[in-house]
Image (cartoon, helix red, strand yellow):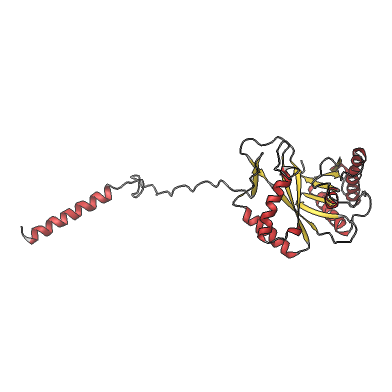
């Protein structure tokens, strides 16, 4: 066979290979659709951890999700602005959960687990308070997740100084006002009063309603503490009324000593329990 014929046969073989490769490919992956439709990329996998820090009913696991690092960095940045701040970590729990040994309830356990992450990030252990809060309402089922805790900022107590009122901002819609021992009607101090003035101006415009719940430590009788908690709530209401808030927008109640957020076994814990919680609710 001559070289010329060989070249012709090679060219024909190459052309046949090209046609088979182009038209015989797997069109779903490599070739345009017959109707000319554009190729679409595979859908991204759904995000399953788009939360900050969560737990589930009865679980000892405190899980961090894709939003946690951003929140952690923000908490650390705020602490750096003023190292005299106290960061309050409130672990959340439902009635009926069994806490590990050494913890009064699952709220304290979850708060302690979160605290470990904060310390590892660089916030000193002495600047972190661990608290707990019972969640009202129906408990979650199965592996349903809920926020394991929330955060608030107060001021560090100065050793040797007497008890004084303290303002803790939990969120844009919740604050805590702490009271000195056995007090409900003395001055709340400049920081708290200034905050209440700002709050009053906000409510005048937004028409949000305000719920104030008074709490106490466990010193004295249940009946006395119910009255004292009510007096604390009513006193905060009176201060807001002074700044022009309509009385119809404010409701008050007392939980007395029934809902401690810290241990009553220590003086510091009892001080943290003497509080009024102020919550703003959206206008109907």
- From the top left corner, tell me how far across and down residue 42 is, in percent: 44, 48
Q: Looking at the image, is 159 positioned above or below residue 148?
A: below
Residue occupying the point 63% across, 53% down:
68
Q: Where is the N terminus found, in terms of image quarters?
A: bottom left
Residue occupying the point 68% across, 46% down:
148
Tally of numbered tags: 0
Q: Where is the C terminus found, in terms of image quarters?
A: top right
Left or right of residue 140, residue 283 in this image: right
Left or right of residue 148, residue 9 in this image: left
Q: Looking at the image, is 19 positioned above or below residue 226?
A: below
- From the top left corner, tell me how far across and down residue 265 is, in percent: 83, 47
Between 272 and 154, the one lying in front of the other is 272
- From the top left corner, tell me how far across and down residue 273 is, in percent: 84, 48
Q: Quadrant of residue 210?
A: top right
Q: Residue furthest front?
A: 101
- From the top left corner, tell me how far across and down residue 183 is, in percent: 93, 50
Q: Looking at the image, is 93 positioned above or below residue 157?
A: above
């Amino acid at each position: 066979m001559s070289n010329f014929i060989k070249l012709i046969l090679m060219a024909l073989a190459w052309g046949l290979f090209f046609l088979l490769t182009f038209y015989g490919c797997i069109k779903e992956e490599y070739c345009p659709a017959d109707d000319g439709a554009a190729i679409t990329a595979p859908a991204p996998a759904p995000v399953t951890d788009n939360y900050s820090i969560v737990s589930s009913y009865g679980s000892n696991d405190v899980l961090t999700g894709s939003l946690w690092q951003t929140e952690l960095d923000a908490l650390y940045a705020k602490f750096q602005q003023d190292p005299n701040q106290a960061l309050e970590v409130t672990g959340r729990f439902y009635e009926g959960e069994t806490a590990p040994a050494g913890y009064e309830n699952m709220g304290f356990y979850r708060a302690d687990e979160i605290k470990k992450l904060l310390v590892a990030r660089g916030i000193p252990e002495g600047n972190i308070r661990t608290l707990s809060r019972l969640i009202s309402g129906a408990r979650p089922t199965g592996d349903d997740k809920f926020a394991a805790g929330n955060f608030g900022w107060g001021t560090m107590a100065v050793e040797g100084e007497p008890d004084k009122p303290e303002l803790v901002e939990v969120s844009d819609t919740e604050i805590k006002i702490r009271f000195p021992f056995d007090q409900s009607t003395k001055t709340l101090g400049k920081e708290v009063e200034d905050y209440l003035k700002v709050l009053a101006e906000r409510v005048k415009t937004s028409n949000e309603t305000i719920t104030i719940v008074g709490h106490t430590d466990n010193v004295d009788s249940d009946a006395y503490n119910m009255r004292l908690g009510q007096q604390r709530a009513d006193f905060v209401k009176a201060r807001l009324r002074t700044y022009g808030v309509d009385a119809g927008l404010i409701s008050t109640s007392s939980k007395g000593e029934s809902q401690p957020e810290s241990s009553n076994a220590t003086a510091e814990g009892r001080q943290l329990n003497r509080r009024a919680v102020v919550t703003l609710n959206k206008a109907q």
